[in-house]
Image: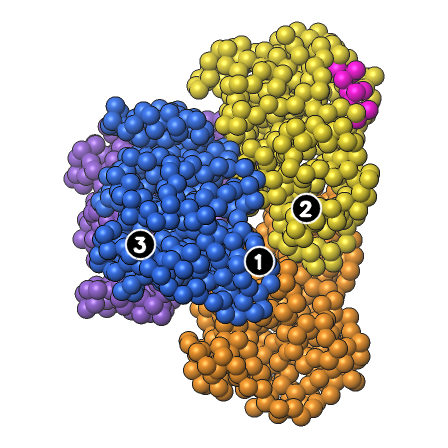
Chain colours: A purple, B orange, C yellow, D blue
Amino acid sequence: MKAYKYRLGGSIEDLRLVEIDIPRPGPGQVLIRMRAASLNFRDLLVVSGKYPRAQQETIIPLSDGAGEIAELGRGVTGFAVGDRVMPAFFQSWLRGPMAPADAASALGGSIDGVAAEFCVFDAERVVHFAPHLSFVEASTLPCAGLTAWNGLNGPVPICAADTVLTLGTGGVSIFALQLARASGARVIVTSSSDAKLDRDRQLGASSVVNYRREPEWDGAVRELTAGSGVDHVIETGGGGTMQRSIASTRRGGWIHVIGLIAPGTIDTVHILLSGVILRGTEVGSRDMLKALNRAVANAHLQPVIDRVYEFTELPAALRQLEAGEHFGKLVLSLD
Amino acid sequence: MKAYKYRLGGSIEDLRLVEIDIPRPGPGQVLIRMRAASLNFRDLLVVSGKYPRAQQETIIPLSDGAGEIAELGRGVTGFAVGDRVMPAFFQSWLRGPMAPADAASALGGSIDGVAAEFCVFDAERVVHFAPHLSFVEASTLPCAGLTAWNGLNGPVPICAADTVLTLGTGGVSIFALQLARASGARVIVTSSSDAKLDRDRQLGASSVVNYRREPEWDGAVRELTAGSGVDHVIETGGGGTMQRSIASTRRGGWIHVIGLIAPGTIDTVHILLSGVILRGTEVGSRDMLKALNRAVANAHLQPVIDRVYEFTELPAALRQLEAGEHFGKLVLSLD
Amino acid sequence: MKAYKYRLGGSIEDLRLVEIDIPRPGPGQVLIRMRAASLNFRDLLVVSGKYPRAQQETIIPLSDGAGEIAELGRGVTGFAVGDRVMPAFFQSWLRGPMAPADAASALGGSIDGVAAEFCVFDAERVVHFAPHLSFVEASTLPCAGLTAWNGLNGPVPICAADTVLTLGTGGVSIFALQLARASGARVIVTSSSDAKLDRDRQLGASSVVNYRREPEWDGAVRELTAGSGVDHVIETGGGGTMQRSIASTRRGGWIHVIGLIAPGTIDTVHILLSGVILRGTEVGSRDMLKALNRAVANAHLQPVIDRVYEFTELPAALRQLEAGEHFGKLVLSLD
Amino acid sequence: MKAYKYRLGGSIEDLRLVEIDIPRPGPGQVLIRMRAASLNFRDLLVVSGKYPRAQQETIIPLSDGAGEIAELGRGVTGFAVGDRVMPAFFQSWLRGPMAPADAASALGGSIDGVAAEFCVFDAERVVHFAPHLSFVEASTLPCAGLTAWNGLNGPVPICAADTVLTLGTGGVSIFALQLARASGARVIVTSSSDAKLDRDRQLGASSVVNYRREPEWDGAVRELTAGSGVDHVIETGGGGTMQRSIASTRRGGWIHVIGLIAPGTIDTVHILLSGVILRGTEVGSRDMLKALNRAVANAHLQPVIDRVYEFTELPAALRQLEAGEHFGKLVLSLD
């Protein structure tokens, strides 16, 4: 079978599509014929050697994929050949709170990922996906979709009376918009592009703010909430936006800190005086991935796909990701 | 002005439409010109003398109404003449948990209600309603809508991954269906009427069970949830349905006990072995009513109205309520 | 080695102390030399054939034990020979909410228990216990201690401002008293025996009610809480006490329904009008058992032991349990 | 009567003890004869003109006091002359979440405080205090005690299995130590003084870290928690300690950000990678003050008093506060 391999500390050019043996499922394991794999900003960090949790010198990249079960290992129950499934991002994080050791079980970073024609996983680390999704659509959920879900469903989850603020139009932000709308919340979106904000409106955003035209966009968000501020922010901007995100949030509201894009600092006194809650937010557990799939099924949610590439085109897909002009997910199809 | 009055311990026939003085707003109060009032099953208990919290011999009935502000008392801020508002069901329950004394502040039962052309309330006990609603639609929220909201948003609120079971097609059940759908949940509905179940489907019910054809409907609900049971039940059936509601619910799931319709008993051992949580559920606080209006606005939710009566037709409206064949709310209009 | 075996559907007389081979730990397993085992009311149900979850014809009884690790299977980490440990009551329930299948993994009921000189368990299903405890003391935690902990630490856990009501002086009730006190709560205890109530006072009970002298003890509990009612009830009484437990509880307060002792019924209207929350409460997960041990260590809590028997005296210990005159746990020692 | 007045933007020297009329309670109000008032670090900010919420040019300082009711205004229920009470820090924040406007109702900063022989308050803004406390002891609760309580009892409150970290020996930190111990938690304390750490041990601290001897004290805290980190930090240090506080906390653990002492910045990437939750923490509502008093009563908690001054010695007391060598609260007595 074909699989991608990359050498730690390399670059996109170092990705190699190699021929290796199809792995065999051991007891309790399943063999999955992968049908699609999607890209995340994190994959750029991995292939450029900047991912903080890399552990091996050579690895199969990509964390997010979907496929069908090709073979069952001994003793597997609850799955059948042909079932449509996806593996969990953190393989060892099944349910409850994340344990420190779980960080070392991230697909396509700490351990081998899904950029291969076949993969083997423990059956308990794989979930069925929402029935209305294609493989291409399903492949977008494990990292980007689940991060948005975990942000919106933390210790105090969103409710239908809430207002949610999302920043920009990255993969997590678009899922956060769709999932927050599906949960009944009102959503305010920021972007620098009117064209992208139009897309956001079509996806259900009640209000949009072009931060190029309104550089002090926290004031605009305050106005849109009659002065009170939003209940939740999906904070994918990092250091460059945090200060205004805090200023956009009501006392007791939540800022879910996501993404490694732009480092920066915040003043501790602002946390105190604003009365907000800042939460470092991870991707999520296998049970959260099951919950996400239930929610996606309930809402018949359609993941937004920007472009589908052939499996052989991973380097090109990564370069489009790098360029940052897409709206929606970039996906490899293995049909 | 005209107002209804009823004598405790009487019947529908004892309702009198009388002429009384328009009340004047004191400091901190508002005068509301009522534009619509809706009926609840509780109103039948009140006018037939069976309401357990009745406190006065003569009272203006009905708890649920909407109108516009006609005059502001001294010192009122946050409201203007012409604002579209509704008074809170429990006048003294503003926020946080319910205090024992709040039970005695229920409109149209413990104290004078809204079946009058003008009413005076403390400004802090009144809330603005969702902008897209008509007066007739808004008048359905304070009791039926808020009870459904409180059920779905208790100590552990619903999330978009949940499945909710509603029983029958009373006012609370229809609101629970609509609000649960707006919150992203899947909803299963029971009824004895295929025609009503068709209406439920149009409102978003994913699955319906006709309990006349399937008297052991808990089995059907289990099957619809792949054996696991639902996450929340809005239990409006009382003694007649409780046993099957418990059997329909997953371990750790919630049964929100609502409604005084049908008394009955349950076996304590079933609570233990099923691992469910039963919660006696009140209407809700003023702050919950604000939250409900935000959620209704976010979702552009349309309350279901069965029939609109003239203000003078309250006895006829109550008799239709008694007959129990309606689907949606019965409302008096005071235009 | 020696182990007890009993035949399903038999009686205490059918217990046999037999000689069987010492089991061997497989990969990921540990061999424990058991040093103590404690008795629960549930064990009487098991040996008299009344336990609803019994699954095998012949079984090693008792769920609660403590011992030291005698041998490690291949690949076990986090444990060493000599470590002082206890197995989890539900072997397959590790963390998060209970899954339906977990019910079939209860020690000494659904599967072999701890009434043996040596036992083998998966290492991940075993926890270290609080360092200050003896084996005899530690053996009392897995069922009785953990049930009390789970009751007090449900969806809305107790806090130091709360008042807790415990009924009688069974094993769960005494642990609930001790753990609630250790958590800062005020505790009210009922019993029919002044001598036992004196013991409760020594354990920290702030107020006691002799329900023989005050058969309407819910009134007494109301008075002790200035009319407002308690925040949590550890309801071990079942049908015989539930009505008064509800009447003793504040609106929004929790009644944790535990124990199979006395069946009975409650009126659904009482749940609604009282506004209480009734929760069927299971023993608990492995992670909860870890948390319990941390809490027991933090508080230097001393489990109350009524009497320690020799391992060979299990029938006599069960008969004392049956008589019901003990205060504190009955334990077998295997020194 | 005598009362202190200070001029905004002044200094300790500008405090004047003046003679003014005893105020009269209006309808719904109570007149309190103040018997004690305690000092907080915030009072130094107020009298030196650095308090961000100051609103008037001249004010009666101090927020924390206790006294007895001297006279009831018309219509007051629930209180009697002679009752031992304390006013709430934020007069308008009664229950539920804090509203933006509540910030302007802080005693002795935004509005007149308690450094007077008599004060008038709305009866609903005053609470009875724990019966075992003297006036001097009770006067320490409204700001310092309640801030510690609010920190420990946030959206996810501490439980008896938790470990709490407190920094230094300021008023909030000592209350946090006592309240966390009363709630069953294990407490780790840092200080630069072995003498103060000895006092902390006597108050129940399980472990202490002298950060002068161990400047990398987060490593010491990690070791004391077997590598996993603490569950809650009461973060009174600000910019100077935040980085190490984050490093001391488990994934998903809470850092309650309190105090305006030392500004500073934190890196947003640390929040993400550590997975901690940072929460800006206010003093608390009236209902929280009631809960605190219940908890203090349940535990017979004794506030730690460093020194009691005469009412006329406020300037001297403020100078001792400024010097920072005290352990426990500084209180004025008005006997």
Residue at which label 3 appears = A273
The range drawn in magenta is C314-324
Q: Which residue does the image show at 35% across and 46% down from the upper left?
A: D39
Does mark 2 fall on the same chain as mark 1? no
Question: Secondary structure under badge 1?
Answer: loop
Question: Secondary structure under badge 3?
Answer: helix
Q: Amino acid at mark 1?
A: Val
Residue D150 appears in the picture as rendered: no
Q: Position of residue B259 (x, y in %)?
A: 69, 64
Q: Which residue does the image show at 44% across and 60% down from the upper left?
A: D119
Does mark 1 fall on the same chain as mark 3? no
Residue at which label 2 appears = C224
Residue at which label 1 appears = D81
- Say which of C193 and D218 sits in front: C193
- Residue C181 highlighted magenta (yes or no): no
Q: Nearer the viewer, mark 3 or mark 2?
A: 2
Question: Secondary structure under badge 2?
Answer: helix
Q: Amino acid at mark 2?
A: Leu
Q: Position of residue A89 (x, y in %)?
A: 38, 40
Q: CA distance from mark 3 to mark 1?
A: 38 Å
Q: Chain of mark 3?
A: A
